[in-house]
Image (cartoon, rainbow, N blue to C red):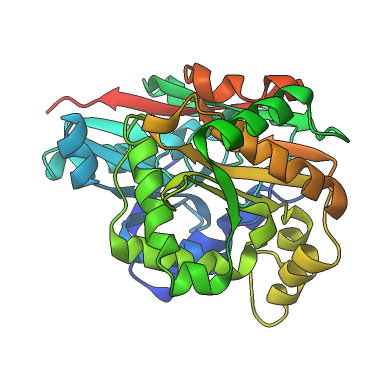
Amino acid sequence: MKQISVKTVSTKQQAKDFVELPHRIYAGNDCYIPDLEGEIRGTIKTTQAFVAYDEQNQCVGRVCAFINAEANKKWQRRAVRFTNIEMENDPAVAKALMDTVEQWGKEQGMNMVLGPLGSYDFDKEGMLVEGFDRPGSMIEIYNPDYYPKLLEELGYEKAVDWVQTRMEIPKEVPKMYARIARYARETFGLHVKKLKNSDIIKGGYARRIFDLLNKAYSPLFGFTAMPIEQIEKYVAEYIWLIDKRLVPVVEDEKGNIVGVAITMGSLNNALRRCNGKLLPTGWWHLLRSLKWAREDTVQLLLIAVDPEKQGFGVSAMFFDDLIPIYNQLGFRWAETGPQLEDNVKELSQWKPMNPEIVKRRRCYQKKLDL
């Protein structure tokens, strides 16, 4: 068997190899959307990052391992998580990488492995297992079809699956949405508020929105509440990317937030052009795609409704507000982010738009022998 050596990322060259490996693995694959290089370097600094080399000292694989203590406490687990895995189509590479993750996890007292998972539910999660012919995006993992096979050969099994749906944006708001939205306004006094940057940065809406997201997503698999410092980091990184017209907030008569939909136009073409680098000109490609050369797809990133207000027509109010704006901006398609396959309430909200499941992704698990 080929000899593979795995090293902890500790030098500039190793970090460079870690960042640049996908460029070789996905060469010629138009479905792959490059990650922003800055985000990957940030992940290296906050996790235990490993890089694998073959006998010719060529980089052939990478992976990050980390322990989410808060999630382990909440879900009563001793799990080491892995993320950012990339590898050549070679069982020896996969085994070397995952053996390293498993050993590191054991040394930290863990008895199982979960992944790909992020630190928080808003990070990229789930290895693609269906939909390899569909382009990825900046919010989701894309990987070749041999990745799941290599993991399963090592004894990794399904923990949960997420699915993603795609739908054509109707020219008019479906009657069901319009009727329910009107009822929600007239009966419950709900209204849609569009935010300004000042509302988010100085007006406290960022914290209030993420408090709602934490509350709504708390029961979901592996979820960990996001601390204020992480909220501030997300806001600082992404506020300039978000068109506030595409982020309706639903409030009640007292100004309490009962729902939020965070959506944005696809940046796939821009990310391909900048190849993951914002400098020196990558930021221009992103800005151009956001403002003047929009793609035909809008991504439904996060939709959350206060559990106490579910069934009040909040989701219908999102679509009643957004569909005319999507048409005005020239979007033709909408694609959801990953949604748990058994989350019937969330999946059923798209029914009036005839959704098609186009991707399936999986969190794998494996018990460790201590």
**Image position, residue 307 (x, y; %):** 38, 31
Instruction: Say how many tags the image has.
Output: 0
Instruction: Residue at 69%, 31% (x, y): give it.
Output: 132
Left or right position of 314 against 329? left
Image quarter (top left, top right, bottom left or bottom right) of the N terminus: top left
Left or right position of 189 against 48? right
**Residue 90 makes an appearance in the image:** yes
Left or right position of 158 against 146? left
Instruction: Residue at 40%, 40% (x, y): give it.
Output: 117
Image quarter (top left, top right, bottom left or bottom right) of the C terminus: top left
Instruction: Residue at 58%, 55% (x, y): give it.
Output: 193
Specify the farthest residue to the front. 186
Q: Would you place residue 110 above or below residue 11 in this image?
A: above
Identify which residue, 28 or 36, lies in the foreground.
36
Identify which residue, 80 or 340, lies in the foreground.
340
**Image position, residue 121 (x, y; %):** 40, 43
Instruction: Residue at 55%, 65% (x, y): give it.
Output: 238
The quarter holding residue 42 reads bottom left
**Image position, residue 5 (x, y; %):** 37, 50
**Image position, residue 330 (x, y; %):** 87, 50
Identify which residue, 230 or 268, lies in the foreground.
230
Left or right position of 45 against 346? left
Identify which residue, 5 or 104, lies in the foreground.
104
The quarter holding residue 294 reads bottom right
**Residue 16 makes an appearance in the image:** no
